[in-house]
Image (cartoon, helix red, strand yellow):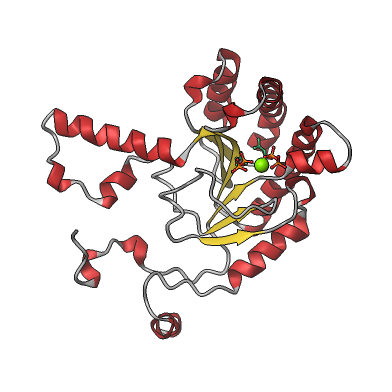
Amino acid sequence: MKTPQSKNDLPDTDIPSVASIPRHVAIIMDGNGRWAQKRGLPRVAGHKAGVETVRTVIQSCAEKGIEVVTLFAFSSENWRRPKKEVTLLMSLFLAALQREVKKLHKNGVQLRIVGDVSAFDNKIQEQIKKSEELTKNNKTLILNIAANYGGQWDITEAVKALANQVESGDLKAEDITSELIKQNLTMCDLPEPDLFIRTGGEQRISNFLIWQLAYSELYFTDTLWPDFDRQAFEDALTSFAGRQRRFGHTGEQIEKMKNA
Ligand code: IPE
Ligand code: IPE
Ligand code: MG
């Protein structure tokens, strides 16, 4: 295996950022089902309540000057849930898109759906296209909704694209670099997440952004997604601001760079 021998072999993205506000926040919105069950309600009531939290978080991001927020709404593994729950999640997704897109547009939010959308029914696919088209020039905040998304799917698609180029003779296998793989991932035009948040108490990635989280700061909270309010989000940002991101450097080097 080749390891970079000097700083010059490393891409620019490895240079530490000392910003106290993350540019990109990625969130696994977990705990809706348990929130509902605790109240003796059907799981779908938790998903409905979770939509309210989505609104609050988007608003907070815009106010804080965060540039990108990526929300995990439905994983490529969530199809394994009972058919009834999947159907309800789909109709909730469609209804939320239909209801919220005008308001998002008015607030300067650019909406992108990331994931294999070809698995969704036509109505959802059409609404996705319409929403993305309407909001594509907005600049206040980029909102990625990860739907039928899997980090392994994302990397597999990138590898397939590169393999096609090798097959057609446009690329040599030995010229494949991590940078090239990165350029073929969804969201390759955006900064990688600085802060990752998972609500609901589990401490795992669940096939979310595997590649892109390589150097993100991780924040786990027991708070269930519907209870994740402004203050809870603020707490996550405070935790982030207190971290020293080193990207392989020593703490002393980082301090020196900060003071330079
Ligand atoms: C997250 O909440 C939402 C989706 C996965 C769609 P869950 O539905 O996973 O809630 P818990 O983890 O069962 O409480
Ligand atoms: C991850 O949550 C997916 C989303 C929040 C959309 P899950 O609840 O599906 O994750 P696991 O199955 O507990 O790992
Ligand atoms: Mg869950």
Q: Residue at x 50, y 43 (%)?
A: 207
Specify the quadrant that holds the C terminus.
Answer: bottom left
Give coordinates of residue 188: x percent, y percent: 39, 44
Q: Where ligand 1 lies, by quadrant?
A: top right
Instruction: Please name the residue shown 58% across and 64% down the image.
Output: 21
Relative image position of residue 140 (x, y in whole percent): 58, 47
* Residue in the foreground of this view, choosing between 188 and 156: 156
Q: Position of residue 227 (x, y in %)?
A: 79, 50
- Kindly identify the residue that appears in the image at 41 percent across and 35 percent down: 153
**Residue at the spot 73% in from the left edge and 47% down from the top edge:** 225
Q: In terms of image quadrants, where is residue 73?
A: top right
Q: Which is nearer the eye, 8 or 102?
A: 8
Work out whether 95 lies above or below 160.
Answer: above
Q: On the picture, is 158 further left or further right than 112?
A: left
- Classify 165 as above or below 199: above
Vertical order, 164 against 11 (above or below): above
Kindly tell me whether residue 192 is visible in this rendering: yes
Quarter occupied by the N terminus? bottom left
Q: Residue at the far top: name it.
A: 122
Specify whether residue 186 is in view. no
Residue 255 appears at what percent x and percent y? Answer: 45, 84
